[in-house]
Image (spheres, grey):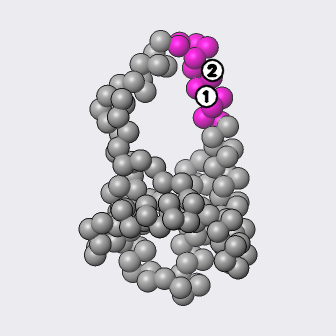
Amino acid sequence: MWSAEENRHGDILNKYLYLSGRLDMKQIEKTIYTVPHWLGNARHAKDHGDILLAKICGLIAADEKRHEAAYTKIIEKLFEIDPDTTMLAPADMMKKRITMPTLLMFDGQDDNLFNHYSSVAQRIGGVTPPRIMET
C-alpha cells in the first residue's frame, strides 16, 4: 500500500506540472527518472497564489507525516525487542556513508542541478537534505 501511495504522490504532481504548462516537462521527466522525488511546499504555493498545488502538497505532507509516525512506532518496537541490533544497523549504514538521492538529480543538461535546486530551496526557506551524512 505504501509504495502505491508514494506512486500516487508522484503521479498527481506530474500531472499538475504537465497540465499547468509552466515548466519544461522534458527536463522534469529527465530529472524524475534520474532520482524519484517530489518538489513543492504547500505554504510557498499558497503564498504565490497556486491554491491547487498548495492543496496537493498539503495532502502529500499529511501522508508523509503518517509515514513518519509509522516509522517511529516500528523503531520503538525494534528497540523493545532488540536494542543492540537496532543501534548497530544505522551505525553500519552511517559508516558506509549515505548519499542523499537528490544529490543524483540530473536533467540531462545541468551538471550542477543539485546545487541549483539546493540554493533555491534554501533561499525560499525549504528543507534540503545534506549531500552526504557521515559519522
Most common SS among magenta residues = helix
**C-beta proximity under 8 Å, tags 1 and 2:** yes
- Give, as a three-letter code, the residue at label 2: Lys
Depth check: give the residue in front, 3 or 118.
Answer: 118
Question: Disc 2 on helix, strand or loop?
Answer: helix
Farthest front residue in view: 123
Tell me the residue at 70%/73% (across/down). Answer: 47
Q: Is residue 105 one of those drawn in magenta? A: no
Task: Give the magenta part as a residue range.
Answer: 70-83
Q: Where is residue 128 in the image (x, y as percent from the top left)?
A: 48, 54
Q: In this view, does 49 lie to the left or right of 111?
A: right
Q: Which amino acid does label 1 sit on?
A: Ile
Q: Which residue carries the number 1 mark?
A: 74
Using the image, determine if residue 34 lies above or below residue 14.
above
The residue at the point 47 percent across, 12 percent down is 84
Q: Residue furthest bottom?
A: 21
The residue that disc 2 covers is 77
Asked if residue 40 is positioned above or below residue 128 in the image, the reply reads below
| Residue 59 percent location from the top left of the image | 70, 60
